Amino acid sequence: MSSIGPEIERLIQLLAKLPGLGPRSARRAVLELLKKREALMEPLALALQDAAAAIKTCAICGNLDTVSPCALCCDSRRDPHILCVVEDVADLWALERANVFRGRYHVLGGALSALDGITPERLNVATLLSRVKDGVEEVILAMNATVEGQTTAHYLLDALAASHVKITRLAHGVPVGGELDYLDEGTLSAAFKARRSL
Amino acid sequence: MSSIGPEIERLIQLLAKLPGLGPRSARRAVLELLKKREALMEPLALALQDAAAAIKTCAICGNLDTVSPCALCCDSRRDPHILCVVEDVADLWALERANVFRGRYHVLGGALSALDGITPERLNVATLLSRVKDGVEEVILAMNATVEGQTTAHYLLDALAASHVKITRLAHGVPVGGELDYLDEGTLSAAFKARRSL
C-alpha cells in the first residue's frame, strides 16, 4: 500500500503477530495508538522496554518475574511441600486469580506434542524431578484437559512413580455457572461418574 | 494479583486499551511478547517509539504520514480536482487498498454525532470548504453508511451547496460476494431501487 509509510506498515506487521490480532485489527489498533500518542502509544513503548529489560524466567519454577527466584518461590508463607505443575505461566496466573492454592508452582513451558515435536527434554521436566526429591509431599498435575495436557500428565505420572510422592489431578466436572445443555459429552460423562452424595 | 509484577500488570493494562483486545487477550499477548522478547517485544517497543516520533497529521488533508503535506497530497500524479471526503484515516487506507481512486483525500476525523458531542467545528470541515474553492471539480462524500455518516454527508451537502461543485456519494448495493439471504432490508431495498439494465 503506497499510502501507508514504512513506520506504520512495520508497526501493523508486528502487532498482527500478537495472538488475537490479525492484520485488520492491528490496523485499527495502530490508528488508535496514533490518535492517542501521548496517552497510549508512548507509555506502551516504554512499558514494553521496561518489561523486556526487567522480566526474567525463574530458575526454580519457570515463572516470569523481575527477580529469579521469583516472588512466589521466595514467599515463605507458601507451602514448599506441595507443588502445582502447570503447562504455562498463563495457567499459573489463572490459578492465582482463583486464589485457591498456597503452595509452590512448577511451569513446564508447554505440553508434550508429537506433532509439534515437543519432547520431555524441551519441557522443564528434569528440574521438576529434582525438586520433588527435595521434601515435596504432593504434586498436583494441573495440565489442561486437552489431549496434549493429559498425555503430559500421564508421562509425568510415570516419571514421578519412583519418587513415591502423592500425585493428584484437578477434578473434572460441570463448570460453575455452566449449563448442561451446552456441555460436551466428555465433561458430562466425567461429572456423572464423579458425582458426590449430598 | 500478587503473582504478577507491576511491569507486567502495567503492560496488560495498556494493551487492553487497544480496540479488539480485552484484559484476557491482553494477558495472552503479554505472555507471547515475553516469550519472544528479542523477536517481537523489543522490535515492537522500537517501532512504537519510531512511529510516535515520526508520524504527523497532514495539514492539508488530515492523513497520517511522516511528512506534512503527506505523500498523497504531494503526489503530482493524483488528480487535485477530485476530493474524496472520508471520516477516518482507516477509510482512506481501505480505499487505497481497493486501488480505485486517483484523486486527493480529505479526512474529517470523525462523523457528526449529537450523542458524542461531535459538532462540525470538531471536524476538519472548514479546511474542506477552503480546499473546495481551490479549483476542485468533484467532491465524493465517502462517509460510512451509518446514521452518523449519512448525517455528516447531508450536512456537507448543505455546506458545499454554495460552492457549485459536483457532489457525489458511493453507491449502495449488494456487496461483491455477498449473499442476499444474509443482507439487511435497507441494503436489499437500496440495491433493488438502484438496479441497472444489462
Image: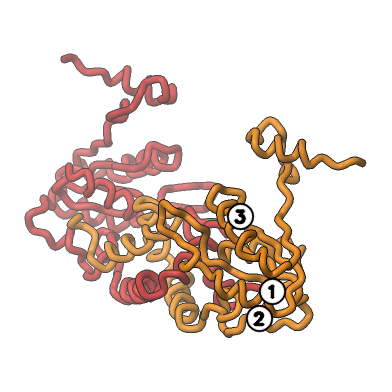
Chain colours: A red, B orange
- Residues packed near mark 2 inside 10 Å, few (<14), some (14 to 19) or many (20 plus): some
Residue A148 or A70: which is nearer the viewer?
A70
Task: Please identify the residue farthest to the right as the structure is shown.
Answer: B198
Q: Which quadrant: the N terminus of chain B?
A: bottom left
Callout 3–callout 2 Cβ contact below 8 Å = no
Residue behind mark 1:
A2
Q: Position of residue B163 (x, y in %)?
A: 69, 70
Q: Residue at x 37, y 71 (%)?
A: A44
**Label 3, label 2: how far apart the Cα atoms are:** 30 Å
Callout 2–callout 1 Cβ contact below 8 Å = yes
Discs 3 and 2 carry the same chain letter: yes
**Label 3, label 1: how far apart the Cα atoms are:** 31 Å
Residue behind mark 3:
B154
In the displayed structure image, the side of residue A139 where residue B107 appears, left or right: right
Mark 2: which secondary structure? helix
Q: Which quadrant: the C terminus of chain B?
A: top right
- Residues packed near mark 1 inside 10 Å, few (<14), some (14 to 19) or many (20 plus): few
Say which chain tag 2 marks: B
Residue behind mark 2:
B71
Say which chain tag 3 marks: B
Q: Residue at x 45, y 60 (%)?
A: B118
